[in-house]
């Protein structure tokens, strides 16, 4: 198991090094991309700070708590984009027939397709945004205990597992219907509902945003634990759902792959 | 002459619906974005009656309108123009007996009309869910509102042409475009009205054309502009539509002069 993990880590390191080299070829473009992401992050912070100065509470959460939710959302989403940028290019892999080449290699095709194009821009951005996030969290007036931090990190990892599963499901959808370009961006738009606690939305929406598009388990539960609010679902259900959802995504991927037939290569 | 552009309009409309699932997902994305913002503001007003100088009905009306206007103004068929130029695909258009800028403009208008049709249908559903309240503006203001929306479309068209001209000289076109999208997201006024920003930030934003895409039009419709502001914004939107047009045409002509393609 350890040997397999080391092998895949070496493969990922190779692709990451290649991506870094590509980034330095297109320095101007990559600087602009980082700048754009910084603008987006800054405006989310500005908006949240505006709320802090003008709003006492939203759905039972004060503005300090809301800031944690916003930061958690950005951290998880950025981390996913660093590792899983390959999912965005999966449609092109299918249409060009390049995916067939991946299937013949002695490396798991899902791993290669999902992680084959790490986004170095987001990696650079993640460093800066994590620093800002850590600073804002530590200067927050919320009482954050070591236990809540530990549970937060555990649930953050669980959220990342669910996010991985979401990307795999989207790749399954793309595998079945390769003319769909917008599916990933449609998910990104829906996921913005996770910027704020899912529990503030209408009761009809909440089960959907927990169990169908599990934004609640990804973004809301970890933040609730960190800010000291009773989570909507307990840790057992949350982690159990994460493991189940990931298992389901792998099963779905295997099933989808059996249905796949190449158009060209 | 008119008939060939009318035919082009029809063809562009049909081409835009060639991949219905992709188009449907695009519309889903737009609805979800608007739905998220409307939901968020609805929740924010559950504990207070007034926020940033807006009552609940006012803010919902604002978000509703700005989404409708921005959804129309920002819809475009010219996203891939730079790539078309750099790859040489535009050579075919250059040989056609049409003005290429008019050709692209007709395509863009067709795309906007197609999106507007669906936006109006989607708006009915959002209207039923969130029930924003509007007071119709006076006739002069309504006419001015329509003029400002048309000018916003023209400003956006020229900006898209400017981004397209990057393709004459470089394959790296998505960097500047990405910055543009982020700036629109930040300063377009869709997530929150720009007048909630501190004064110094507002002054900075008004140095750009971004507030003129949808924010000022919405404020005019909602009756939140006094006569001085109406005059200032009329000058501003007129300035940007002419200035960007002159710049775009000048750079476009330079690009066409330098352009060469082989093998098509």
Image (cartoon, coloured by chain):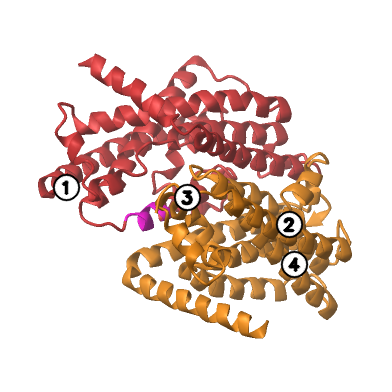
Q: Nearer the viewer, mark 3 or mark 4?
A: 3
Q: Which mark is residue B178?
A: none
Numbered disc 1: secondary structure: helix
Q: What separation in Å lies between label 3 and label 2 (alpha carbons)?
A: 24 Å
Mark 3 or mark 2: which is in front?
A: 3
Q: Secondary structure at mark 4?
A: helix
Instruction: Kindly report the distance in space between the C-alpha atoms of the residues bearing marks 2 and 4.
Output: 15 Å
- Which is nearer the eye, B125 or A117? A117
- Return the disc, 2 or 4, that comes first in the chain's sequence: 4
Numbered range of the magenta stretch: B173-178
The label shown at residue B255 is 1
Q: Classify mark 2: residues with Cα within 10 Å, few (<14), some (14-19) or many (20+).
A: some
Instruction: Name the residue that disc number 4 marks.
Output: A158
Label 2: element kind:
helix
Residues at discs 3 and 1 in contact (Cβ within 8 Å): no
Check whether the beta carbons of the residues at disc 3 and disc 4 lie within 8 A of each other: no
Q: Which residue is mark 3?
A: A262
Q: Quadrant of residue B51?
A: top right
Q: Which residue is mark 2?
A: A248
User: Mark 3 or 2 closer to N-term?
Assistant: 2
Count numbered badges in the picture: 4
Query: Image quadrant for the C terminus of chain A?
Result: bottom left
The answer to whether residue B244 is left or right of residue A54 is: left
Nearer to me, B192 or A157: A157
Tell me whether marks 1 and 2 sit on the same chain.
Answer: no
- The relative height of residue A262 versus residue B74 in the rendered view (above or below) is below
Residue A4 x %, y %: 62, 80
**Quadrant of the rendered image containing residue A7:** bottom right
* Chain that appears orange: A
The chain carrying label 3 is: A
């Amino acid at each position: 198991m350890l040997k397999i993990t080391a092998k895949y880590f070496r493969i990922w390191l190779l692709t990451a090094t290649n991506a870094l080299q590509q980034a330095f070829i297109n320095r101007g473009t990559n600087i602009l991309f980082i700048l754009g992401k910084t603008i987006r992050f800054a405006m989310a912070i500005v908006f949240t700070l505006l709320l802090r100065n003008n709003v006492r509470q939203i759905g039972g959460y004060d503005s300090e708590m809301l800031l944690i939710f916003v930061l958690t959302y950005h951290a998880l989403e950025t981390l996913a984009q660093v590792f899983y940028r390959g999912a965005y290019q999966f449609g092109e892999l299918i249409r060009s027939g390049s995916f067939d080449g991946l299937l013949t290699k002695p490396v798991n095709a899902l791993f290669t397709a999902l992680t084959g194009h790490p986004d170095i821009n987001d990696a650079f951005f993640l460093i800066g945004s994590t620093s800002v996030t850590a600073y804002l969290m530590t200067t927050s007036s919320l009482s954050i205990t070591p236990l809540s931090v530990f549970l937060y990190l555990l649930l953050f990892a669980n959220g990342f597992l669910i996010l991985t599963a979401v990307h795999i499901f989207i790749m399954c959808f793309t595998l079945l219907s390769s003319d769909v370009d917008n599916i990933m961006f449609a998910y990104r738009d829906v996921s913005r509902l996770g910027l704020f606690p899912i529990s503030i939305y209408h009761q009809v929406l909440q089960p959907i945003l927990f169990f169908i598009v599990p934004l609640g388990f990804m973004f809301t539960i970890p933040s609730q634990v960190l800010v000291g609010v009773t989570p909507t679902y307990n840790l057992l259900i949350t982690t159990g759902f994460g493991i189940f959802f990931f298992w389901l995504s792998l099963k779905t991927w295997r099933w989808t792959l059996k249905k796949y037939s190449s158009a060209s290569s | 002459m008119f008939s060939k552009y009318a035919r082009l309009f029809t063809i562009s409309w049909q081409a835009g619906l060639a991949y219905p699932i992709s188009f449907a997902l695009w519309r889903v994305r737009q609805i979800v974005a608007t739905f998220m913002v409307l939901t968020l503001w609805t929740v924010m007003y559950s504990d207070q009656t007034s926020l940033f100088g807006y009552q609940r009905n006012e803010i919902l009306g604002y978000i509703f309108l700005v989404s409708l206007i921005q959804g129309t103004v920002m819809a475009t068929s010219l996203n891939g123009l730079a790539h078309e130029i750099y790859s040489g695909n535009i050579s075919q258009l250059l040989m056609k007996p049409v003005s290429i800028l008019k050709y692209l403009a007709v395509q863009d208008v067709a795309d906007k009309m197609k999106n507007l049709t669906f936006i109006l249908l989607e708006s009915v559903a959002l209207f039923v869910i969130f029930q924003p309240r509007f007071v119709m503006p006076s006739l002069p203001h309504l006419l001015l509102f329509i003029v400002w929306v048309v000018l916003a479309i023209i400003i956006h068209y020229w900006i898209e042409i400017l981004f397209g001209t990057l393709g004459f000289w470089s394959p790296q076109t998505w960097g500047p475009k990405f910055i543009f999208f982020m700036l629109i997201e930040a300063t377009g006024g869709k997530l929150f009205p720009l007048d909630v920003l501190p004064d110094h930030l507002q002054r900075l934003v008004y140095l750009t054309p971004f507030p003129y895409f949808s924010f000022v039009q919405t404020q005019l419709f909602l009756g939140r502009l006094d006569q001085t502001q109406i005059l200032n914004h009329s000058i501003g939107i007129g300035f940007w539509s002419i200035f960007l047009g002159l710049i775009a045409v000048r750079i476009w002509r330079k690009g066409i002069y330098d352009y060469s393609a082989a093998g098509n």
